[in-house]
Image (tube, rainbow, N blue to C red):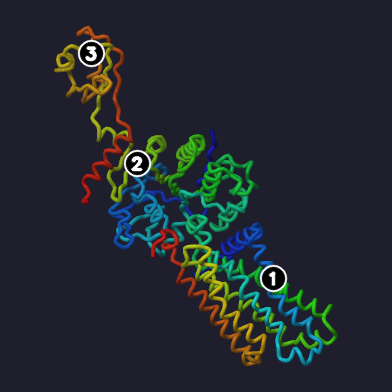
Amino acid sequence: MKLSRRRIRAIVRKELRTYRRNASIVVAMAVIPLLFIVQPLVSVFAVSAPEGQLGDHHELLYLLGIPALVPVMLAAYAVVGERQEGTLEPLLGTPIRRDELLLGKALAVLAPAVAIAYAVFGIFLALVVLFARPGVASALIRGPDIVAQLIFTPLIAAWSIWIGIAISTRANDVRVAQQLSVLASLPTLAVTTLIAFDVIHASLGLGLALGVALLLLNRLGWRLVSALFDRERLIAGTD
Amino acid sequence: MFVVSVNLQSAGRSERPSAGPAVAAQGLGKRFGDRVAFEDVSFEIAYGEVFGFLGPNGAGKTTTVRTLGTLIAPSSGSATVAGIPLTPENGVEIRRRVAIMPETPGLYPRLSVAENLECFADLYEADDPGARIERALRSVNLTERTHDACATLSKGLRQRAALARALLTDPQVLFLDEPTAGLDPAASRDVHELIAGLGRSGVTIFLTTHRLDEAERLCDRVAILNRTLLTIGRPEALRERRYPKALRVRTLDRLQDPGSVFGGLPAVEGWRQDAEGAYVVSVSDPRVAGPAITRSLVGAGADVLSIEESSASLEDVYMKLIADDAEGRPQ
């Protein structure tokens, strides 16, 4: 089965236009990342002796909570939102295939989520370099943490998106879908937070294992969502 | 008055088959668990025909459209749509050749009319989308609102935008599900004119409605559904089949002896007086009975106000069929 890039692009473009013109989405995408930046900034600016107080903490990795939470709210809206607005039936009446629709929806969430996560990460680094006490920046900004941030941001975002879309395909109400999706993304958030505070010790082996696991989960997530997407149930509302 | 111009030749990927019906259903049915949505539905629709699908709420009209549009799978029977067998494997190919306009327009409210159409043109992978969008909007007289967000349009204008979206790819079969539901009379008239224009330009239209005036005005043939197909045919043929022809005679005063006036006349089969005091004379051929009745009335010294053909409406046929069907169903 050959997927149509044009159809996938059409969905991505339509979704991005809708996000841009929806004030509540714009606000949510701005506020949640800002909440994540507060704790690391407070702890970094409170540091008096960088080497001693920062210890083995990985404040940068705490920001991996952003790709875990930001996309899930949008992804949860993806299918059930269209269903509630009455736009799903005309959409499914076109020649679009299930996988094209799901990929389009996922990419439309992934792009802004990753961009926001990277942007907030960059802002955080700039604030630390410019305003933290001498020595804090060099103690905090470590090469492996930056690499981990760059690699894990899209992987975690993609996993959150598949969770959100999976719930969205089965839920009957947008709010329920969003609440369940946030709940379902909490384990990811817990893992990144525990690593950031060194409860789970960060190592190359752990990073590789988590990276492979997320790649597999993302592949599995797409297949799972595809299997859950029941055109007839979504249109006729039957179980 | 709207100008509807549909370029059937430029349908591109989906060449119209030279022979065979546009839509054919054979014993088609759909169940949701134990609940029957519709069953044993058989009909054929020719290319270029405007076919009305009538029935009360819950009769299975929308489910039939969704089934033929490959949105849901049939439970029984078979069908061909735009010349292609209705099977899960053919879903994409069928959807390329048809367009469905659901009861609610389903436009993206935050996108402009043009952006909505652009999205759908891409979903159909239509060539030259700009020209198609312009032509579709012109055909529904909506060019002035091209760049307005759909949320700002009135319900009637949204319906027109949805119709433009359905016309984008010159579909071989256009499914219109209750296109005037919830519209005011003026907006309904606009949509009627559009549909009539499409019918004249040769588009095959499958129109579901419970508005009988709409069906009578727009459709070449109608089918009446109440989970099963109750009847099918041209509106006038259905009326004639269900109701015998009659002449309605109004006189200034009551006739002294109506039996002697109407009795024994050629083509007259019987008579009765209606609630307004007029005489309803059942006839086998109005053209034979009319002059004979006139002569007889004049001969009897009656002051004749009018003699007119009494015709049952499609609504009479519909109500009778639905009532008969309700009586016949097991409780």
Answer with left or right where residue A90 lies relative to residue A62. Answer: left
Residue at image mark 1: A116
Check disc 1 and give the amino acid type. Answer: Ile
Q: Position of residue A85 (x, y in %)?
A: 52, 56
- Kindly identify the residue that appears in the image at 63 percent across and 46 percent down: B146
Q: Nearer the viewer, mark 1 or mark 2?
A: 1
Residue at (56% x, 76% y) in the render? A185
Residue that label 3 marks: B254
- Are discs 3 and 2 both within one chain? yes
Report which residue position mark 2 lands on: B222
Identify the residue at horizontal 46%, vertical 61% (top origin): B92
Which label number is shown at residue B110? none
What x and y, as percent, mark residue A163? 53, 73
Q: Say above or below: B54 vs A239.
A: above
Q: Foreground: B25 or B331?
A: B331
SS of the residue under disc 3:
loop
Spatial separation of the CA atoms under disc 1 and disc 3: 89 Å
